[in-house]
Amino acid sequence: MAAGVAVAAGISLVAAPAGAAPKKRPALPGDVNGDGRADVIAGAHLLKAGGRSDAGGVVVWFGGAKVAAKARIATTSKPVARENVGKVLATADFDRDGYSDVLASGRKKIVVFLGSATGLKFSKSFAWPITNAPMKAADFNGDGFGDVAVRGNREIVVFKGGSKGLTKSVSLKNGAAEFGAVLAVGDVTGDKRPDLLATDLGPAHAGSVNPQRVSVIPGAASGLSMSRAWAFLPARRDVFDIAVGDLSGDGKADIVLATGDQVVVHRSRGVTVVTPQILSFSDFPGDLAIGDLVGDGRADLAVHVAADNHDWVEIYRGTAGGVTVKPARILRKETYETGFGAALTVSDVVGDRKPDLIAGAPGVYGVGQVHVLPNGNYTGLQRLKLSTSGGHGLGFSLP
């Protein structure tokens, strides 16, 4: 058995290897091998593993000035057909051993992989009431151990990190049946501690009368609690992605919502948001990511846009009022039907202390790629792929 332990009443999820003493500093988010640089992590939920079709897994390429070409694939110890492990991912150093770990969704299951110098190692699987449960990881209580929030049945379950791994800490409820359908993390309050954001329900159908309230649950030394939460109602009920980052440069992370044909930018005031800025699209905005890709010291917004058989990414420069009306950069050199940008994240995988844009390109038949664009540019572009035959779902999910 790997470094996992038996789950007692579904509480204890991960244990550090025997005799392993936590390092003084936790790994950077996504730094699986502990070398001080983030790695490229992607789900492959259609991967054939152990002879089982669509068992799924998690793929890692080590970061560096040139990202390692070798793909390191982690699967469960006993792959199950059509379990689709890796459709949703979250990463943080849960046990503070200096290696970032990964939580991955599956079919009514969650899988824990532990980081190491050689890549991810399977630790434990446990049953979960939600298939492909939304999840986000961050150090919500500021103790140096990564925590993770996972949508459950009518609740969000928070697992607290510690020297022995993740332990169930608290359940967050607000009465909504789909609370946590969309999750995001960022320092909205400006207190240097990450906060959790959650919608009440998933994207509503056109005739829905239910509001899609967005709750902000502040991080605190005592952990996440609904007693400190505040919420706002977005103008629309079809929010399907949220990104959080300090676009205005005032020290408080702003909240960006992706809807059917608009991107809505809410500037944070710590305990409320101001009247939003609206970006309208003739095509369909998709996944969002935030980071200083332009290099002016202020975060920028990357938006995936989908049209018929073609996808691209638009980068909007952050400003004191939100973002620029027109994109500062458009990345659209990809061929048709690649799905370029269907998953986006911003992370320093090159190791030059500048954010890089990581973009999934799942393709039509699920034989996808992950593209690394240093500082959000095509210069130095790397296209990462798997040598395995058949569809593997690469490019659909990034942490």
Image: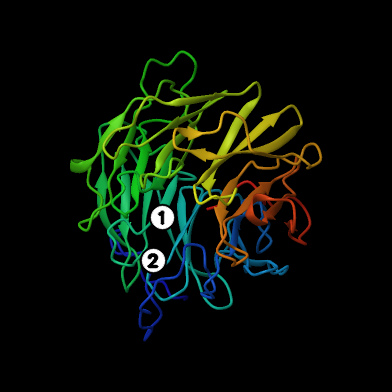
SS for dot 1: strand
- Label 1: how many Cα within 10 Å (few below 14, some 14–19, many 20+): many
- Residue drawn at 52 percent across, 72 percent down: 36
User: Between 231 and 55, which is closer to the camera in this rendering?
Assistant: 231
Q: Circles 2 and 1: CB distance less than 8 Å?
A: yes
Give the percent coordinates (x, y) of residue 15: 37, 73
User: As shown in the figure, which amino acid type bears the numbered disc 1?
Assistant: Ala
- Residue drawn at 35 percent across, 78 percent down: 24
Residue to which mark 1 is pinned: 137
Q: Is residue 380 above or below residue 267?
A: below
Q: Is residue 131 left or right of residue 381?
A: left
Give the CA distance from mark 2 to mark 1. 9 Å
Question: Of label 2 and label 1, which has the lower sequence position?
Answer: 2
Q: Is residue 31 above or below residue 241?
A: below
Q: Residue furthest right?
A: 335
Residue to which mark 2 is pinned: 94
Tell me, yes or no, if residue 86 can be seen here: no
Give the percent coordinates (x, y) of residue 124: 45, 65
SS for dot 2: loop
Q: Residue furthest bottom?
A: 19
Per the rendering, the mark at residue 325 is: none
